[in-house]
Amino acid sequence: MAIESNMLALGVQAPNFNLPDTISGKELSLGELKSSKATLIMFICNHCPYVIHVNEGLVHLANDYIIRGVSFIAISSNDVDNYPQDAPDRMKIVAMQVSYPFPYLYDESQDVARAYKAACTPDFFLFDGDMKLVYRGQMDDSRPSNGKLVTGRDLRKAIDLVLNGKSVPEKQLPSIGCGIKWKR
């Protein structure tokens, strides 16, 4: 069943974290990964059809904006005991297959997902250069079954506004996807 994101309050400071990167094997912190221009934190996972649907678009989006100084960070917080396809070793395989140009971090304790009030995969949080939340919501209006192309329109618009020093409108549509698989 698909659920919507929680729509964390705009203007909040990004909660810090230190998580293992399943691609490099290193522990990485928000302080190391953030950008002075804009930082997009994405809660994703391997098995969710909503994430699988946007994966190629995420790679295009990241490749278009990383060269402009935007930082992209993917985090999976799913319970791997009940969803072993989301385990760190499989995260690395998916990241390599899809060619993620960003770190894919594993939030085993689920504390980071709770701190961000993440609810679904994918769930997107865009922070400005001061690490204040300026956008949370959908990548675009494409869904696995609606026939619309994945363009990243909503995220692209928000990132462009931040890069141009303009305010992102407060009216934002929530992301929709699979609920995060919380530990029992």
Image (tube, grey):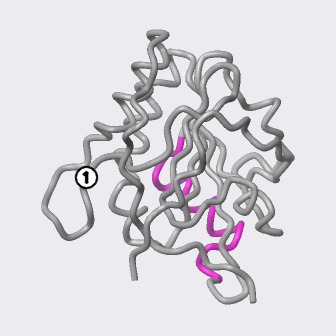
Q: Nearer the viewer, residue 134 or 140?
A: 134
Q: Is residue 11 left or right of residue 99?
A: right
Q: Is residue 142 magenta?
A: no
Q: Going 75% across and 46% down the picture, which residue do you hit?
A: 24
Q: Secondary structure at mark 1?
A: loop
Residue 18 image position (x, y, % from top left):
86, 47
Residue sitting at 83 percent across and 39 percent down?
Answer: 29
Work out which quarter of the rendered image holds the C terminus and state it.
bottom right
Q: Position of residue 117 (x, y in %)?
A: 65, 59
Query: Which residue has dot 1 on it?
Result: 141
Which residue occupies 53% across, 68% down? 46
Is residue 183 found left or right of 170 in the rendered image? right
Considering the whole magenta stretch, tell me its main secondary structure.
helix
* Span colored in magenta: 84-100
Taking the image as shown, residue 49 lies to the left or right of residue 16, namely left
Q: Residues within 10 Å of mark 1 (few under 14, many from 20)?
A: some
Residue at the spot 48% in from the left edge and 19% down from the top edge: 162
Q: Residue furthest top?
A: 164
Q: Residue furthest left?
A: 147
Along the viewing direction, whichever of 177 and 89 lies nearer the viewer: 177
* Count of residue discs: 1
Image quarter of residue 3 = bottom left
Q: Amino acid at mark 1?
A: Asp
Q: Position of residue 61 (x, y in %)?
A: 40, 35
Does 169 sit above or below residue 150? above
- Name the quadrant of the N terminus: bottom left
Residue 76 appears at what percent x and percent y? Answer: 65, 62
- The quadrant in which residue 125 appears is top right
**The quarter of the displayed image where residue 4 is located:** bottom left
**Depicted 103 relative to depicted 142: above or below:** above
Most foreground residue, 146 or 49: 146
Residue 85 belongs to magenta span? yes
